Image (cartoon, helix red, strand yellow):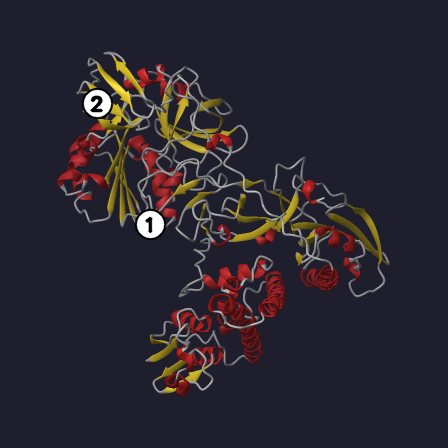
Amino acid sequence: MITLYDYELSGNCYKLRLLMSILGIDYKTVPVDFYPGREHKSDWFLRLNPLGQLPVIDDDGFVLRDAQAILVYLASKYDASGTWYPRDNPELLGQISQWLAFADGITSTSSAARLHDGMFYDFDIETVRAGAHRLFRILDEHLWFGEQEGRDWLCSADHPTIADIACFPYIMLSEEGGISRQDYPAIRRWCDRVKRIKGFVVMSGVFPAGPAKAA
Amino acid sequence: MLDQARTRWHPIAAAHDLPLRHVFHGQLLGREFAVWRADDGYVNVWENRCLHRGVRLSIGINDGRELKCQYHGWRYSNRTAGCTYIPAHPADAPARTITNRTFPAVERYGLVWSATDEPQGEVPEVAGLAEGEFLGLRGIPVNAPADRVVARLRGYSFQPSGRIDGNDAEIAVEAAGDFSVALRAREGGAETLAVFFVQPVDSNRSVIRGVLNSDAEGAARLAVLRHHNERLSKLRDAIEQEAAQAPAPEPIAPQFERLPAELAEMPELTAHGRKAALRVQVARKWQAADGIAGFELKPLSGLLPTFQPGAHIDVHMPNGEIRQYSIANGPGESDRYVIGVKLERDSKGGSVCMHESVREGDVLAISEPRNNFPLRRDAVKTIFVAGGIGVTPLLAMAQALHHQELAHEFHYFTQGESQLAFRDRLDGLKGTLVPHLGLDPEATGAKLREILSVYKFGMHLYLCGPGPMLETARKIAAEAGWPEGAVHFEYFKNTNKIDDSSSFEVALARSCMTLKVPAGKTILEVMREAGIDMPSSCEQGACGTCLATVIEGEPDHQDVYLNDAERKSGTKIMTCVSRAKSARLVLDL
């Protein structure tokens, strides 16, 4: 059984809950009081992850940290369809890694702005917001041309991958950091598509999209 | 410049920004919009705020027919933006005043156009752009005032579509306005007209929306789109750098208007009776079943008022008769009212007139829709029992539940297959529709006993049909343990013999008036004579429109609208037929 060291309001923990729900993986959670308790800096947690960061999983004794790394692990091990992290497709694997790194960029900008506004973290708010807008402009352009080419997802496959899951949470939560997505209509449409993946779950601040029109 | 811009048409979105079941987040001159396309193709441009708690509707759910707010689930109808359902008040029909603000919408050149104030004239026709033969570029948001963007766009340089790889195109400004620039690029024999509309989002924000005069296909099309995207992005960066040097203008504060007068004001004092506020045209008349004519009523101009499932209208007929008909539409079908009229030979001539005199193209006077038969949408399961033409209100209800995928059964009793009305709509209810054909009263009773045998907490029953059938069904439901609050019914007419021989006094608590009701006159008539504008519809105690709250005194109920519990409580009265057993009745009017 997988144990997820979890904080309800963390987008990085949410992306694991999301993938595990989509893949139908059973798991239990150990809540970690990130704010205001700073439990992720406590001794017991630092023994699990010396970086003092959420999330961490423990899969029958195998302990892994870093949201993007855990997505790779979970999809490689538990996705019977082999589509979320297609191990035999070098181009897709390369693209996925590219977007996982992009997701880290979203975390260090959009998530930082949210921590500043919601949990009083000391970031230069204008800088992190501007950084998020820079990334969102690039992403919106990528997704807009994707639609023109008949591509719905971040990578050039006709199905979603862990790249979409990795980028989704802190985009959806950006408004909690004062970053409007009004100027990114292609991102907003892609968010609807992610929300319509079978097994999608919400978290506080992420709303459902309602069903697509039946064909 | 921005002041005059309010009454002009501006693009607010690209057509491809509005896929089905999506809500686009738009803004024009400081005012935010929730923009969504219904499944019937209609583009709704609404103020981006739920009337309840002010949450942005752009994060709501477009279900194809209605927009649902994420916060407390208020639902608003396609076209009218009228509220159709409030989950916290499941038994009530929302008031008509709960209507969101709408803005005009026109699609042209692959763009959706709107205006924050009443727009002057039509959406601009652009010389050189033909509908159906253009290429819409990716919209480029720019953090700069529109006038600065327009000024810099005059110097925009690009290659004609056939010569993307070249680098020498000659650019000529063909036309320019406050919010648009038309440029023509020529190189070799190739030339392309590019028209750029600049959408003033706010005082310091704009969107460049470009349209080329010729389309292309496949890789060539993508190359053209990328060419412009690249050059426009560069231009945007330059404009933003320049704009950042100047102090940013104050954002435009949107004006939040009060409700329109017709929604906000109390109705005027009048003594006349039932009003026909609307004029509609019979757009279609057809045989909906044996002996049943279907009518599709469309507005002469503008939009029809919002309706909810269970609502009815009064139709004022050419022969002077007034009849009530339930609206059979499904949710979001807000461009028309569909009614079904059964031919009753022995009637006073209402249905005969509708069947024989009213033709397609005729104009009819109707009342605004009223809903005294509202549908709850919080039932664990809903059972509908329709008899004959009683199908119409229940059909509207079943379509709403079907669309929301809420559990229901639809039992429809008729003489035979040919009497099943509105087959196209019934076809949409596959899986829940159970027709019961040709049953005599005894067999009908047995079938009803079967249908109503199991009551569970949270179930609701809706009945509409001929009087004797309703009596039977209500009796069977009561015997099977259905509480009165879970049994909802609507009679076609009141067949009780009205006894109007009593005389008594009516005190109107709010109006500070005491009136004498003599034998032979109704409370409603006496109130009207005294200048009280009491709404009414059927005026025979069946529809529920003229309901009043009783504060004191004992009512003498003669209607068929109230259920037994409501009658016993003595707190409600239908003023069109019911009277008083006590010498004095105090009403909350």
Q: Is residue B347 above or below residue B395?
A: above
Where residue B105 sits: x, y (%)?
Answer: 59, 42
Q: Is residue B332 above or below residue A34?
A: above
Q: Which residue is mark 1?
A: B406
Q: How many marks?
A: 2
Q: How much space separates mark 2 and mark 1, taking CA atoms? A: 36 Å
- Left or right position of A23 against B147: left
- Label 1, residues with CA under 10 Å away: few <14, some 14-19, many ≥20: some
Give the amino acid type for the residue marked by disc 1 in the picture.
Answer: Leu
Q: Nearer the viewer, residue B533 or B37?
A: B533
Q: Quadrant of residue A59?
A: bottom left
Give the amino acid type for the residue marked by disc 2 in the picture.
Answer: Gln
Where residue B586 sits: x, y (%)?
Answer: 25, 24
Is the N terminus of chain B in the top left, top right, bottom left or bottom right quadrant?
A: top right
Where residue B133 sits: x, y (%)?
Answer: 70, 49
Name the residue rendered at 32%, 16% in the picture: B525
Tag on residue B558? 2
Q: Nearer the viewer, residue B34 or B518?
A: B518
